[in-house]
Amino acid sequence: MLSKELLLRAYRLMMTAKAMADIYDANRQVCKYVHSTSRGHEAIQLATALQLQPSDWVSPYYRDESIMLGMGYRPYELMLQLLAKGDDPFTGGREYYNHPNSRREGFPGIIHQSSATGMQAIPTTGIAQGIQYREKMGLSTYAAPPVVICSLGDSSVTEGEVSEAFQFAVLHELPIIYLVQDNDWGISVSSDEARTNDAYEYAAGFKGMERMRVDGSDFEASYKAMEAAIHYVREYRKPMLVHAKVPLLGHHTSGVRREWYRTAADLAKHTIDDPGPKLRKKLQTEHKVSKAELDKIEEEERAYVQAEFDAAVAAPDPDPRTVAEHVYAPSPVTEEKGDRCPEGREKVVMVDAALHAVEEILQDHPEALFYGQDVGRRLGGVFREAATLADKFGDDRVFNTAIQEAYIIGSTVGMNAVGLKPIVEVQFADYIYPGLNQLVTEISKSCYLSCGKFPVSMILRVPIGAYGGGGPYHSGSVESTLATIKGIKIAYPSNAADIKGLIKAAYYDGNPVVMLEHKGLYWSKVPGTEDAKTVEPDRNYIVPFGKGNVVLAADEEAVENGETLCIITYGMGVYWAKNAAKQYPGCVEIIDLRTIYPLDEKLVYDTVRKHGKCIVLTEEQLRNSFCEALAGRIAQNCFSSLDAPVMTIGALDLPAVPMNMGLEAAMLPSADKVATKIGELLAW
C-alpha cells in the first residue's frame, strides 16, 4: 500500500491540474491559443513523473501537463507557454501549450516536443540509443542508470514511425519505456474506427518488448505499474511498453470541443473513471482523510492556480525583435583553415577523401559514430564510402541499420541531446523522402523552438545524382526540396578537397547538415570529371559553409571589353560548365557554390555585376527549382548591372530520370547544351 503522504501529494496535484483546466475553459478569450489538458490522464502521468530521477529523460506529449506538474514545474511556467509569453521557459512564446523542452538542473531532460503525433518516438528512442552507447563505450557513469520515457497517445501508435522506433528498441535492447495512454479517441475518430488492436496487443509483435496493462485512472495501480516498469528498465536495460487505459474528460483541444463529436452517454461513461474522485474515495475510506481536509486542498489549489494564472496573464509578450533568434546555433567555423594541397601527395578520388574525413573524425572524437544502410563491416557502403571503418572502429561505432530512413535521420536528435555527434547515411537521395518528416518536423525546428537549448549537431550523407543508367529511383536530385527546409544546412561539394573540408566543417558546425555527394563524381568515372580528383588536404583542413569558389576565371581584358559571362553552379554542373567553357577560352567565369545553404550571395552578386551576364546551371528539373529561385534573386539584386536576362539550365521537367542511357542524356544537361547557351548569351 502506498503511503498516505504520497496519495495526498498526488491528490493535490490532481486538483492543481483540474483547476488549471477549469480556469482555461472559463477564460477562453484570454486563452486564445490552441491547447489540450490532462483531464482524465492525471493518475498515470503523476505516477510516472513522481518516480523519475534527474538523470532520466522524458518526452511528454501535448496532453501531459500532469507529468510536468509531477516533475516540479509550476503552473505559472506552463501558463507562460499557454499564453505565448516572452518568459515561456521552453519556447519563448513560439510553440503550443505543453510542448516543453528542458535541460534544467535537477530535473529529467526533455528534448524539443513537436505536435505531430507519434513523431517523438524516434528522437526519444535515439536518446535511449545514445545512453546505451555512452554506457558501452565508457563515456558516462551514472549514479542510477538513466531511464527514458516516451509518452504517446494510443492513436499515434498507428503511425509507421512508431513501428520503426519499436523495432530499433527491441533489436538493440534499449532502456526505454513507451507509455501509451489510451482514451479511445483520436480527435473524433474512435478506437474501433482506427485499429483492430490496441498498443498492448500491437507490441506483442515486437519480440523482446516487455509489456503490461494498467488502469491509468487508478493512481495506486498506476504508481505500482510504473514502479515495476522503471525498475525493470533501470535494472535490465531493455524496452518496455505500458498500456494505460484512461478516460478523456476534457476537450481534444480548445479548438475541437468534446460536445461537437461525443455523445452524452460517452461523456458519462468516461466521467465514471475520473482519477480525482477515485483517489478522493480511497483517501477517505482507506486512510480516513476527512472530507473537510480534501475540500481544503481543492480550494487551496484553486486559489493557487488563479494567482499563477493572473501572474502569467500579466507577463510581457515576446519582443518581436527576437523572432529570428536561434534558427541556428552559432558556428565556430568561420574561415578556411589548414593545408588544402599538401606537397608530395597524390590525387585521390572524392569517395576516398570523404572516407578519410570520417575516419579522422572518428579517430579524434569518441563521441562520433556512423550508421546507416549497408555502411557496416560487411560491405562498407554501396559506394565503398565507409569501407574499413567498422574494422577500425568496431561495430558499436560503425554499423548497419534496417531500411528505416525515418529512424536513421530522426534518431540523431536524441543521440545529440546526450552529447553524441552522429554521422548517418541514407543510401540514395531518392529514398530520403520517408525521412523528411523527421528532418522537417523534429530536426530543423529543434534549435529555434527550444530557444537554442537543443540544436541538433548531425551530418546526413546522401549520395545523389544521375549517371550511367541508374534509373528512376537511383538518379534523383533533391536539393530544391531540401532548400525549402529552414533550420538545416546543405553542402554539395564537387571535388575531393571540398568534400573533405566540408565534412569536417559540418562536424564542427553544431547544426544539422545534409551532405549531398554526387555518385558520378565519387570515382570520376563520368568523362570530363577528372578534376574531381584532387590532392587530399591535411586532417585540419576545413571549408566554411557559405563560401563559394571561383573554379575558372575569365580573362581581365575580355571582362573589360564586355565579352564575358559567369556560370553559377555546383556538383556535376561544375564539370559541364568547365568543359563547355573550353569552347570560349577566357570568356567564362565559373562559380562553384559548394553549399546550397548558407549561400555565398556576396560572391554570386559581385561576380554577376562584374560580367553583366549570367547562367545558373543545375542538374535538377528546372521548373520551380533552387536554380530558378537563385536566378530570380540575382535578377532582383543585380538588375542595374545586367546586360541580358539571367539564363537558367537544368534537366527537362520529367517526373523521373529514365534508365535508358540515351533517354537519360536527353533529359539531363551536358557540356554541349551548356556551350550552346553560352554562345547565345555572349551574342546577346
Image (cartoon, helix red, strand yellow):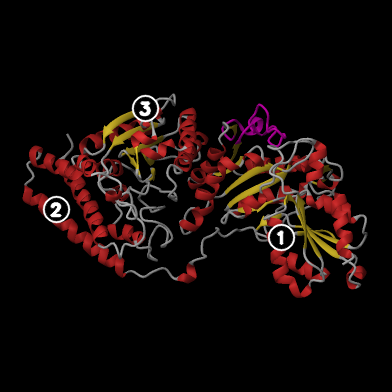
Residue 58, numbered circle: none
In the image, residue 408 sits, relative to residue 113, either above or below, namely above
* Residue at image mark 1: 547
In primary-sequence order, the first of circles 3 and 2 is 3
| Helix, strand or loop for disc 3 | helix
In primary-sequence order, the first of circles 1 and 3 is 3
Is most of the magenta stretch helix, strand or loop?
A: loop
In the rendered image, the quadrant that contains the C terminus is bottom right
Kind of residue sitting beneath label 3: Glu
Instruction: Give the percent coordinates (x, y) of residue 190.
Output: 33, 38
Give, as a single range, the part of the protein colored magenta: 372-398
In the rendered image, the quadrant that contains the N terminus is top left
Distance, label 2 to label 1, CA atoms, is 63 Å
- The crowd level at tag 1 (other Cα within 10 Å; few <14, some 14-19, many 20+) is many
Distance, label 1 to label 3, CA atoms, is 54 Å
Instruction: Give the percent coordinates (x, y) of residue 8.
Output: 16, 46
CB of mark 2 within 8 Å of CB of mark 1? Answer: no
CB of mark 3 within 8 Å of CB of mark 2? Answer: no
Q: Nearer the viewer, residue 28 or 286?
A: 28
Q: Residue at x 18, y 58 (%)?
A: 302
In primary-sequence order, the first of circles 2 and 1 is 2
The answer to whether one can see residue 662 in this image is: yes
**Apparent side of residue 242 relative to residue 588 in the rendered image (left or right):** left
Quarter where residue 350 is shown = top right
* Residue at image mark 3: 201
* Residue at image mark 2: 297
Nearest to the eye among marks 1 and 3: give it: 3
**Apparent side of residue 111 relative to residue 636 in the rendered image (left or right):** left
Kind of residue sitting beneath label 2: Ile
Q: Residue at x 60, y 58 (%)?
A: 331
Q: Residue at x 21, y 37 (%)?
A: 218
